Image (cartoon, rainbow, N blue to C red):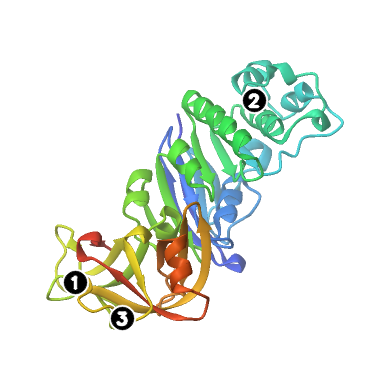
Amino acid sequence: MTGISVRAVVENRGVDVEFEVAAGEVLAVLGPNGAGKSTSLHVIAGLVRPDHGAVAVGERVLTDTRAGVHVAIHDRRVGLLMQDPLLFPHRSVAANVAFPPRSRRPVHWLTEVDAADLADRMPRQLSGGQAQRVALARALAAEPDVLLLDEPLAGLDVAAATAARKVLRKVLGKSGGSAVLVTHDILDVLTLADRVVVMESGRITESGSAASVLATPRSGFGARFAGVNLVNGVVDADGAVRTPAGTTWHGGLAAGLAAGDSAVALFYPAAVAVYRDRPHGSPRNTVEVTVAELDSRGPAIRVRAEDQPDGAPGLAADVTAESAAELRLVPGERIHFAVKAQEVAIHPSA
């Protein structure tokens, strides 16, 4: 079993990252488009040479810019699976899996990904989910030390993605190698990841166990991904969070936080009440916001406000369709969000 160590600066892409993946661990990398997630994977795979940095897999140094080391892509023992399976159209499934250098036990890996019955088919005869399973078998047949997964399920329908996650969970558990998964899907994190890092603007802004990042995110993207509101600020003398814009958020203060500490206030959109006029006798936390968009989410309507003054994602509230109709909300209008203090949790910031 082998771990991964990455330190990479890619100047023309604005990427400056450092992280490790323990042996046998699956690390999920989250972040908005353009954050540098795929670039980080491509540095590990050898497709991108960093301007500064080093990549090691176990005891093997794959890249070291100071020493002038850059192991060729085909000698890295790194498997890369992307959204496009990139199967050779003129080769059968079995021939595709047997193609990579050092490919071993192609029949075994086709069986492992529940695709043994597809061995004699051509790629044009496969569904999207079947093609991804074959691509996974091809990557695994080379028995890589590291598996890199760059949104491999993004193009699949719900049923195919569910089946693919089941296969991935099985093979990742058996292979014993390390894996790095870039994804925008919370189900991938819940079912596959041991740990999470969040990238924003080429930097890692948050890291932790999958459970902790989803339960108590510390970054703007992490909060939006987990479906919670996040407000940045500093703990004041009363134990509330005061933002740079001057608003104050009262809530339950995590142990160890003291006045002057950087902190985030977290609360769920379902805990937010929406008013046209500032409510009287309302909860302690009331802010005026501008409606940015309305989004239907099953029986609820999500009201998303414009970005916060510090650039953090806009706050969100979930209201019933009846309430939305009664309030006659439209983008551009000024409204009030109110949240009870007992619904707000205050934690240290990233």
Image coordinates of residue 187 in percent, x first then y, are: 49, 42
- Name the foreground residue: 59 vs 316: 316
User: Which quadrant, please, contains the C terminus?
Assistant: bottom left
Pair 1/2: label in front: 1
Image coordinates of residue 26 in percent, x first then y, are: 46, 38
Residue 137 located left or right of residue 198:
right
Question: Of label 3 and label 1, which has the lower sequence position?
Answer: 1
Q: Kindly identify which numbered label has been placed on residue 240.
A: 1
Q: Are marks 3 and 2 in contact (CB under 8 Å)?
A: no
Amino acid type assigned to the residue bearing label 1 in the image:
Ala
Image coordinates of residue 8 in percent, x first then y, are: 51, 57
Q: Residue at x 58, y 30 (%)?
A: 163
Q: Which residue is mark 2?
A: 141
Viewer can see residue 302: yes
* Other residues around mark 1 within 10 Å, as few (<14) / some (14–19) / many (≥20): many
Q: Which residue is mark 3?
A: 278
